[in-house]
Amino acid sequence: MRIGFLLNDAMNEPLPSTTLHLARRAQEMGHEIWLMGVGDFVYDASDRLLAHARAPQVKKYREITDFRDAMVSEDAKVERIAAEDLDILMLRNDPAADYETPWAQHAGLVFGYAAMKHGVIVLNDPVTLSKAINKMYFQYFPEAVRLKSLISRNEQDILDFYYENGQRIIIKPLMGSGGRNVFLVQPEDEANIRQMITSVMRDGYIIAQEYFPPASKGDIRFFMVNGKPFKVGHKYAAVKRVGSGKDVRNNIHAGGHAEVAEVTDEILELAEIVRPKLVKDGIFFAGLDIVENKLLEVNVFSPGGLGIASRLMHKDYITEMIGILERKVSYKRYCTGSLDNIELNTL
């Protein structure tokens, strides 16, 4: 099996990285892996989709840091590969991380779609991802599991929402990730709320969300694969993310830390409510951010934390994921022409 992994920048992938864990394990299992960034594609005069890609020379590495260092070293294998020779292309870039380079935000989707047209299984489905490039996608999930939200670039709209919700709301960019520019606005912030709105509005539309007090104790990153809760044995892939106590954000990259998650019946019921849309949209791999019975976010671009879940839950979710990819390639081989990309995403 030949697997391509698309990153924002193949030379600067930060750790912890679910993508690097997947690539490392796939290579250890005997598969050919290639890593590329959103600026590495070529569409040539013969209508071929190519990519300047790289891979470590050695098959096994003791630590994930060794794998990353080998991938970016001068000794790494670097080739211009043809997308049509890949079995799978995993879109693991985060458009929101490229907010300072607008051309890069859609590149993965554009070339991912081209790869799909060349017969490659593209995960997650690029057509759906083009609709999910900002947090508006979240509003299309069932209202029963969502917090009350407002999306606007009008200051007065956001002020009205602030007062209607007891002067406690979260504001964040409609297009953003990793906890960047996320603020809890409280009564004591009333004098500064206009400046806070202006600051977030520099990134475009604002999503204002009612404050949910239990979120201050952390949230659960719950993984869905093939449109179902992801588990090995009886243990679900999940991580409890807890903030520093001084920050509303629980994101690991924003200073939070990870703990063992308790997967409750409420979480499983919520997952069942959102499952039909994930299947319909061809979302192979998603990270649901959950507090009690409420969904805070749906992460369909590069959800992270699977390696952390493996360590905390003492289950090898990474190897299980590679096995699922192997089965998808088999499905396509034996059902030639009868399965489209969306179907392959959730089989």
Image (tube, helix red, strand yellow):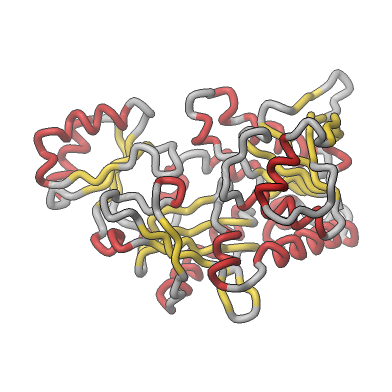
Q: Quadrant of the C terminus?
A: bottom right
Residue 52 horizontal side relative to residue 235, left or right: right
Q: Is residue 47 above or below residue 325?
A: above
Corner quadrant of residue 141? bottom left
Q: What residue is drawn where x is 62% and y is 52%?
A: 18
Provide residue 111's location: percent of width, then percent of height.
71, 32
In front here: 159 or 91? 91
Kindly indicate the quadrant of the structure image that contains residue 162.
Answer: top left
Pinpoint residue 24: horizontal percent, then vertical percent.
74, 52
Residue 3 coordinates in the image, percent (x, y): 79, 48
> Does residue 291 appear to the left or right of 273 in the view shown?
left
Q: Residue at x 63, y 44 (%)?
A: 92
Residue at 57%, 41% in the rendered image: 14
Relative to 80, residue 276 above or below: below
| Apparent side of residue 25 relative to residue 86 in the rendered image (left or right) | left
Q: Judge by depth and name the residue closer to the eye, 238 or 273.
A: 238
Q: Position of residue 78 (x, y in %)?
A: 83, 32
Query: Is 147 in front, or is 241?
Result: 241
Q: Nearer the viewer, residue 198 or 70?
A: 70
Left or right position of 27 against 269: right
Residue farthest to the top? 45
> How many circles with numbers are drawn on the protein?
0
In the rendered image, the vertical position of residue 299 relative to residue 7, given as above or below: below
Can you say whether 151 is above or below 282 in the image? Answer: above
Residue 346, quarter of picture:
bottom right
* Residue at 21% in and 36% down: 157
